Structures are given as C-alpha cells and as structure tokens.
Image (cartoon, rainbow, N blue to C red):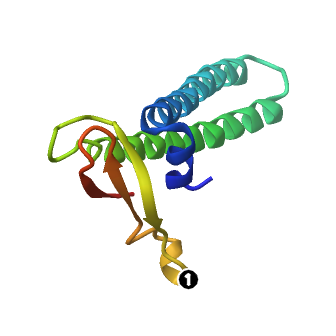
C-alpha cells in the first residue's frame, strides 16, 4: 500500500508506530540470524558431522541477515524522514494532520521515487504544507 493511502487510512501516528514495529521485527530477525550463524559456525568447527549442511546454514543465515539489516535500515530511515517533516509550521503541532493529496511519479521515475510528495492539512490550525517521501 502506498504511504499516503496508508497514512490516510490509519493516521500518521499509527502509521509511524507500525513502521517502527515492522522495522524492529526485522532487527529481531537479524539477531536470530546472528545466533544461527554462530551456532552453525560452532557446529562446522566440530569434528565429523555434515559440514556441507553447516556451510549452507551459514550462507542462508548470512543472506537472510543481510536482507533483514537492509530492510530494517530502510524502514527506519523512511519513517524518520517523514516524521521530521510532520510538524506544522504555523502551530508547531506534531503529527496532527490529514493527507489531502499526493503525487507519485510514473514511468522511469517511479523506481527512484524522486518527486513523491503529499500535501497535508493540519487538524489544529488548518495550515497546509508538503511532505516529501
């Protein structure tokens, strides 16, 4: 689901909380991969056993761990980038706004998400500003 539609449906504060929870679940997955990696490396150094299986476990744990780290950093960076713009310039209210409209690029620019923004309206004072995402 697109960010503006998700924020419009849930509200900014719930969306932000959800993004942080999803991001931190990826961090937990990363920590589990590290524990798995250490366990597989310990079993790999033991005499006998299935070293090929342990090597596969190490490679899979590394791949999943790198993906989880990348996703964790992406989600937290994106949430913080939007949260830093969530203050009304007129009344200084944080996160008390609704999405009025949004612009998502199409074509070749859709992959880089350059030029994506949403126009928001403060629920307290009615001030309008643009939030890039």
Residue 78 pos. (x, y %)? 41, 47
Q: Is residue 112 above or below residue 20?
A: below
Residue 48 pos. (x, y %)? 82, 20
Frontmost residue, 49 versus 3: 3
- Residue most toward the front? 125
Q: Is residue 87 left or right of residue 64?
A: left
Q: Is residue 71 left or right of residue 102?
A: right
Residue underneath mark 1? 107
Q: Is residue 115 above or below residue 35?
A: below
| Number of residue marks | 1
Quadrant of residue 45 within the rendered picture: top right
Q: Is residue 21 above or below residue 89?
A: above
Frontmost residue, 55 versus 18: 18
What residue is shown at x 49% (from left), y 31% (from top)?
14
What residue is shown at x 17% (from left), y 37% (from top)?
92
Residue 38 pos. (x, y %)? 60, 21
Residue 76 pos. (x, y %)? 42, 39
Frontmost residue, 14 versus 126: 126
**Badge 1: residue crowd in 10 Å (few <14, some 14–19, many ≥20):** few
Element assignment for label 1: helix
What residue is shown at x 68% (from left), y 40% (from top)?
59
Q: Quadrant of the C terminus?
A: bottom left
What residue is shown at x 33% (from left), y 36% (from top)?
95
């Amino acid at each position: 689901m697109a960010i503006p539609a998700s924020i419009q449906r849930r509200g900014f504060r719930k969306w932000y909380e959800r993004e942080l929870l999803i991001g931190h679940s990826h961090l937990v997955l990363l920590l589990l991969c590290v524990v798995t990696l250490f366990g597989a490396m310990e079993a790999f150094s033991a005499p006998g056993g299935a070293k090929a299986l342990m090597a596969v476990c190490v490679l899979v744990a590394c791949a999943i761990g790198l993906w989880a780290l990348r996703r964790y950093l992406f989600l937290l960076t994106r949430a913080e980038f939007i949260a830093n713009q969530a203050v009304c310039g007129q009344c200084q209210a944080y996160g008390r706004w609704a999405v009025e409209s949004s612009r998502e690029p199409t074509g070749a620019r859709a992959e880089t998400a350059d030029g994506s923004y949403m126009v928001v309206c403060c629920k307290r004072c009615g001030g309008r500003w643009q939030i890039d995402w």
